Amino acid sequence: MVWAPAPALSLHERGRDEGGPVKPSGSRATAGGLAGALLALGAPLGLLATRSMVSGRLSLGDLLTEVRSDPATYTYVTLSTLLVFALFGRTLGGQADRLYELSASDPLTRLRNRRAFEARLREEFARSDRRAAPMSLLLVDLDGLKALNDAAGHRAGDEALIGVAAALRGGSRQADVAARWGGDEFALLAPDTGREEAAALAERVRELAAGSGHGVSVSVGVAVLENLGRMGDAEAMVRAADAALYEAKRSGRNRVVMAEAERGRAQRGAA
């Protein structure tokens, strides 16, 4: 089946792209702050226990009397240690968030890296399989990167890669997940996306890449869980998209090819 170029979709229609820079959720910073606050309670409790043991008064009433006898000290110890431990815990948690951001990001394009993307792909595949919901995977290859590097230098090649990343961001929705798959290849995961929507999304990305001003084009292979049946795992979906991408490159590049697993081959899309 030949797919005609789809009408360009506005950013409003597609929504914003989740495949931009990997941003820390802040969950570790929040958890660290809460943990620090809980640990800080050990200071006033330790002071109370020490004074009570020295005086030999350990009943609940004696403990309350001890606190009321020196409220300024107990208030100071509680608030000061609470502030210090909470800030320290939040700082450590923030560092953990930043380390996660670095470990999950491609340093050049600021998209997710392959390891982070594959983890998300497996999660979405399992969710889609459980719900019998459609899901699409696009593998995108920058055409002629080696020739560009040889002719204009690696800096021009890097700019072209960044341009493709921008096309993925501009052409996808908030729920979609973009990543640098490796080298000159990218991946885009589109949950709850059927065949026609996936074809339109792929054409949108192809058009944006061609219009990025870097004089490059992309080839796109698309696998859709909806029409490929209930595949055994996410790796099978990757293989189907990769076969479609190979067909797009073999057929002349700068085109979209939709995988057709039921026929055991990839079908050519429109240039």
Image (cartoon, rainbow, N blue to C red):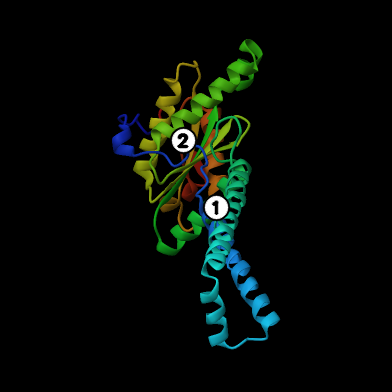
Q: Is residue 7 above or below residue 75?
A: above
Pointer 1 local density, CA inside 10 Å: few below 14, some 14–19, many at least 20: many
Labels 2 and 1 touching (C-beta < 8 A): no
Q: Pick the residue in front: 29 or 238.
A: 29
Amino acid of disc 2: Val
Instruction: List the single residue furthest toward the front.
Output: 69
Toward the top, the furthest residue is 151
Q: Position of residue 7 (x, y in %)?
A: 30, 30
The relative height of residue 251 versus residue 61 in the rendered view (above or below) is above
The residue indicated by pointer 2 is 257
Q: Amino acid at mark 1?
A: Ala
- Against 7, is 40 above or below? below
Q: Is residue 253 visible?
A: no
Q: Earlier in the sequence, mark 2 or mark 1?
A: 1
Q: Which mark is residue 29?
A: 1
**In the foreground, 31 or 19:** 31
Q: Position of residue 83 (x, y in %)?
A: 55, 56
Q: Residue at x 51, y 76 (%)?
A: 68
- In the image, what residue occupies the spot 43% across and 50% down? 135
* Left or right position of 91 against 219: right
Secondary structure at numbered mark 1: helix
> Residue drawn 56% across and 52% down?
87
Task: Tell me which corner region of the image, top left, top right, bottom left or bottom right, holds residue 105.
Answer: top right
Q: Label 2, label 1: how many angstroms apart (C-alpha)?
A: 44 Å
Q: Residue 234: x, y in percent?
A: 55, 53
